Amino acid sequence: MSLWETSVHMRNLPWNLARREKVKSTIPLKFQRYCPNVRVILDCTEIALETASSLTLQSETFSSYKNRTTLKGLIEVAPNGLVTFISPLYTGCISDKEITRISGVLPLLEPGDDVMADKGFLIQDLLADVESKLIIPPFKRSAQFSKEETEQTQAIARLRIIVERVIGGIKSFHIWDSPVPLTLIGSVNQIWLNCCVLANYQGPFCFEE
């Protein structure tokens, strides 16, 4: 099965987000003030890829962020650390916004959902189309944050640690220790899917009170 075929297969998997009421009950009370409606936390990660001899393929897979050829995937987790959606792996040059747009995650959201992400996720307009809202750390507008902005930033940072831990768990599988060989390009999405699913059995990734 080719990379394109497995990408189509993964987009058609029956992903189901955790119910909003269940998600809300997993957010510690002290974070309810700043993140009461967060349903999912999004992030992207990159997997090192063997450099191809083709200059065209090199260009398509080159990541300016990693300064090498990579494959890039979108991860979505609930506040309790459960992986609830993963995208197929795309070429490393794709932006966070584009991978969010084409991955199939947007139709799973419901009106009123808050989506937490890093400042680099410029997806406000995509979320607005599905009546959801982006929650990111506030941008510094003056010499220092106000007390409320500081507390909000800390709350968001604590929740974002969860998705970073999940990604760390996925990458703990030794198959990712070295660049993915080009000979595995046809099956890498199946490997990626298996590792992401198995990460749900490694937890808990959520922080303690």
Image: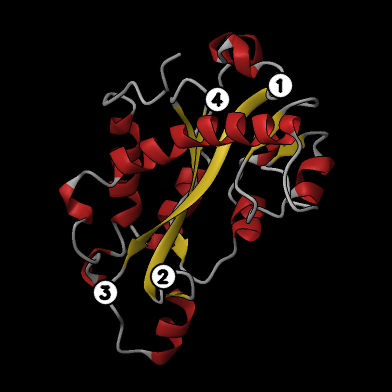
As shown in the figure, which amino acid type bears the numbered disc 4? Asn
As shown in the figure, which amino acid type bears the numbered disc 1? Asn
Residue 170 rendering spot, x and y as whole percentages: 31, 41
- The residue identified by callout 3 is 50
Q: Which mark is residue 37?
A: 1
Disc 4 packing (10 Å; few <14; some 14–19; many ≥20): few
As shown in the figure, which amino acid type bears the numbered disc 3? Glu
Mark 3–mark 4 CB contact (< 8 Å): no
Q: Nearer the viewer, mark 1 or mark 4?
A: 1
Q: How is the image coloured?
A: secondary structure
Q: Nearer the viewer, mark 2 or mark 3?
A: 2
Mark closer to the chain start, 2 or 3: 3
- The residue identified by callout 4 is 16
Separation of marks 3 and 1 at Cα, in angstroms: 41 Å
Q: Residue at x 47, y 20 (%)?
A: 80
- From the viewer's perspective, is residue 153 above or below residue 65? above
Residue 109 at least partly seen:
no
Q: Which mark is residue 66?
A: 2
Q: How many marks?
A: 4
Mark closer to the chain start, 2 or 1: 1
Element under label 3? loop
Separation of marks 2 and 1 at Cα, in angstroms: 33 Å
Disc 3 packing (10 Å; few <14; some 14–19; many ≥20): some
- From the viewer's perspective, is residue 150 above or below residue 80? below
Q: Nearer the viewer, mark 3 or mark 4?
A: 3
Mark closer to the chain start, 1 or 4: 4
Element under label 4? loop
